[in-house]
Amino acid sequence: MKVAVITPDNFPPDIRIEREVRTLLASGYELCIYASDKTPVSKRVSNYLRAKVVYLNYKIIKGFSFMDWRELLSVLGEFNPDAVHIHNPQIFVQGYLAARKLKAKVVFDNHELWTVFSLFSKVSYPLRLPLLLIYFVLELVAAKVSDVVITVSEDMKDTLHRVFRVNKKKIFAVENFEEVSLLSSLESNLNKPSLTSVGNDKFVVCYMGGTEEHRGLRYLLESLKYIESSVLDKILILIVGDMSENLRETISRLPKNLSSKVVVTGFLPFNSALAFLKKADIAVIPYEKNAYTMYALPNKASIYLYFRKPVLATELRTLKRYFGNAMYFVPEPHPRKFAEGIVKLYYDKQLRESLATKGYNLIVRRNNWEYTSQKLKKIYQMFEISINKNKTFLHDLHVR
């Protein structure tokens, strides 16, 4: 079976799409990936593993992709897919029209609740309502007309079903969990001495990932103000991620004696980032608590737990649903609450060890890509059966 994968963004990198592509290739499907390209050429072709990647130079304005669907039909027609897997709503309409013209099955893979996301986007207020309406219509149409809808969590699945009145039987939650086999292979290469000297004599509190405002790093950094001096002397905040403008401003507002306790690595390759994570005593997910983050299921959660790091996190609906008592939750993202959590975990070694064991066991037994990818395979197995039945029917009809 031939599967066309369409993303409105560049590719790679995209951790989620890469995982799905590897899974479908391993299942024996032929893949062609269509992604955006900022280079000034009309079409460029590359490869990702055994999949062809076709880069299309379509315009992206305010996050929306503009391309004539007939142009997309032309390049898709060269591949002639049996199924078209469209990531996110920005280029869904063009992908859907082209897919239906080719009589292909359509999968809508929604990485976010984009309608909710639009409420927290950094656009000017006059544009916020139009942006919300556009995303609402795009998500509604995509969820209604697709053969299958994929979300990143059960909570997102429930919300799409409730808000858009979509048949729940066609929605599959394919969670954002990491591949245990990949983490295991990377871990075996991280045991070399002197990978990093950060925090050798400190209690290291590590955050890994994006540093935008909704990640809540200000709560983590401002928590230093409320930590007793005997513990504060031992604390080091390690941020494995970019020095964004938001993060820079937050650090600049701290007193010198506190800002000196913050280390920001900048962007690192995945294996280098993991080397820093291994130095941590605890890891954190200090996200804002709002309608957008409540559904967050970040990759970092399963990475932290696989590497046996006790996790201190804001109590968000989806995190609580999947990780329960394997994480130490604070009810609200507030500097004092995170300070209390850090101090508690600093003194309570038994609790740290208990959380580390529970978290690791949860990841290797269930909350991993090997387990949840079975749902992705099931979708395409259903498609394959349907397509083969149709081909058999047409063949029998022709013979008669």
Image (spheres, helix red, strand yellow):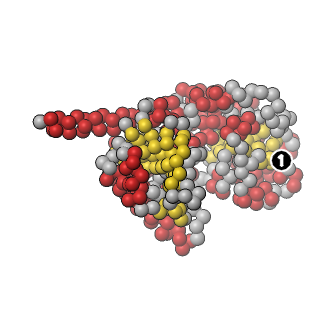
Q: In this view, does 326 lie to the left or right of 199?
A: left
Up the image or down, 315 lies above or below 305; here it is below
Helix, strand or loop under label 1 = loop
Q: Is residue 233 left or right of residue 180?
A: right
Q: Nearer the viewer, residue 257 or 4?
A: 4
Q: Quadrant of residue 12?
A: top right
Considering every residue shown, the one lying at the far left of the view is: 400
Q: Name the residue under label 1.
A: 261
Q: Quadrant of residue 150?
A: top left
User: What residue is shown at x 81% (from left), y 57% (from top)?
Assistant: 254
- Which part of the image, by quadrant, shows the C terminus? top left
User: What residue is shown at x 57% (from left), y 35% (from top)?
Assistant: 178
Query: x, y percentage for residue 391?
Result: 25, 37
User: What residue is shown at x 20% (from left), y 36% (from top)?
Assistant: 395
Considering every residue shown, the one lying at the far bottom of the view is: 126
Which amino acid, by three-letter code, is at mark 1?
Answer: Lys
Query: x, y percentage for residue 399?
Result: 15, 35
Q: Can residue 254 be seen in this view?
A: yes
Q: Nearer the viewer, residue 82 or 63?
A: 82
